[in-house]
Image: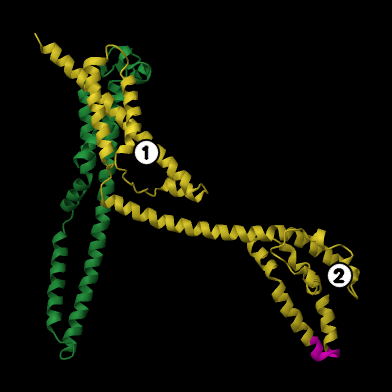
Amino acid sequence: MAWFLVLSSVFLCNLMKTLLPSISSFLTKMVQKDAEQESEMRAEIHQMKKEQSSISMMDEFARYARLERKINKTTDKLKTHVQSRTAQQAKMKWVVNIVFYILQAAVMISLIWKYYSDPVTVVPPKWIAPVERLVAFPTGVAGGVGITCWLVVCNKVVTLGLSAIS
Amino acid sequence: MEASEEKTEKPSSGVSAAQRRAELRRRKLLMNSEDRMNRIVGFAKNDSDNSGNIVIVRLEPRFHLDLDRTQPWSSSSPSPRPSELPGASLEDEMGGLRQRAKLERGDDLSGSPRRSLQQYLSRFDDAMKLRSQLANDKQAQDGGSDSEELDPFRIFRLIGSVLLAVFVRVFVCKYLSIFAPFLTLELAYMGLSKYFPKVEKKTQTTVLTAALLLSGIPAEVISRSMDTYRRMGDVFSDLCVYFFTFIISHEIVLLIASEAP
């Protein structure tokens, strides 16, 4: 059942790849401790703007200006906060991607190592003529399907399938 | 030396010397444009050596550079000309000849540095546009999905490959190679493609296409190559699906055969 093992590994890898953005955003939310602070600031700004809209600038200029300054100050603080959050998100995304690609490479290398000399499946050689040598690479077994050929085929099919589903 | 001569003449003919100097300056400014351009692009570095001669030589109309001129100066301005001018000294003749030789070289190059500068500027503009296009495409790609688009014909091809693989496994594989029916199928697809609606695929600007465009390869050649590459990719996808389905169906048949009493 080597062919099934390779197929399922490739499927899992490709599935993880499509879920990478969600995983990185989930991890970012877990790591971020002051996420509430941002929503509080937004609510505060919204409240202040609402209050400011109820004030007449002509009649209560000082209060209006004071509110305007507060809104500006809070908006600047929010911008800084959002910038740092975005930077953290980008860093987390980068880390998650790197980790994933390392894991994927490790899985592929281990599969190739395991099935280097054993074909994943064997068919009569004349069925896959005239490319039996290419298909059997690197096993050299007549009629065998080598790990490299099967990996490429599975990868392509899984990619097509997942793109059709998504 | 010419400057000192001018200085000694100054006290003797006050207004006329000043007028003459003004006229010389004016002509120098008007007729020095080519030298300025050459200096900008790095040619004609020895103009300062002949600055004195230039003042005198540039008074002669024949040294006014004609950018549209195709013939070299030597063919149209014969050597006796400097001696035709009244009061022309040997020094002036040598300076004129030197200047003419320089201009002959500069005339061939005057078109090309300006042209190359314009080419450089246009390429720079193209590079900036491609850069912004790349950034937009990258944003769209990050925002959207990276998956390949499946148009109706593509789906038809894939389903056809699957069905053929199953058919070949059940009926055909004992008699001939499995790739023969596949090749026949691909030939059939080539004929059937015109009956399906063509989906216009937006050419994505990648770093590779941007580099190819900037290196001077025409856009049509690039788009045709990309189209050919896309078609090859479609055939490869069909082959992978076909082979995969064939192997899976083979394994299923073996499983059923082994479980059957």
The percent position of residue B155, horizontal first and vertical second, equals 25, 36
Density class for disc 1 (Cα within 10 Å; few <14, some 14-19, many ≥20) is few
Q: Quadrant of residue A125?
A: top left
Chain in yellow in the render: B
The picture's colour for chain A is green
**Which labelled disc corresponds to residue B92?**
2
> Which residue is at a point 83% across and 66% down the rendered structure image?
B96
Q: Nearer the viewer, residue A137 or B61?
A: B61
Q: Is residue B259 in view from this perspective?
A: yes
> Which residue is at a point 81% across and 90% down the rendered structure image?
B14
Q: Does the residue at mark 2 contact the one at mark 1 (Cβ under 8 Å)?
A: no
Q: Nearer the viewer, residue A25 or B179?
A: B179
For the magenta stretch, what is the residue range? Answer: B11-17
> Which residue is at a point 43% across and 58% down the rendered structure image?
B129
Answer with mark 2 or mark 1, whichever residue precedes in sequence: 2
Q: Is residue A148 in view from this perspective?
A: no
Residue sticking out furthest to the top: B261
B53 up-or-down from A143: above or below: below
**Which labelled disc corresponds to residue B230?**
1
**Which labelled disc corresponds to residue A77?**
none
- The kind of residue on which mark 1 rests is Arg
Q: Nearer the viewer, residue B215 or B163?
A: B163
Marks 2, 1: nearer the viewer: 1
CA distance for labels 2 and 1: 69 Å
> Which residue is at a point 42% across and 55% down the rendered structure image?
B131
The percent position of residue A88, horizontal first and vertical second, equals 25, 55
Q: Nearer the viewer, residue B165 or A10?
A: B165
Q: In the rendered structure, the residue with mark 2 lies on which chain? A: B
Can residue B118 be found in the magenta stretch? no
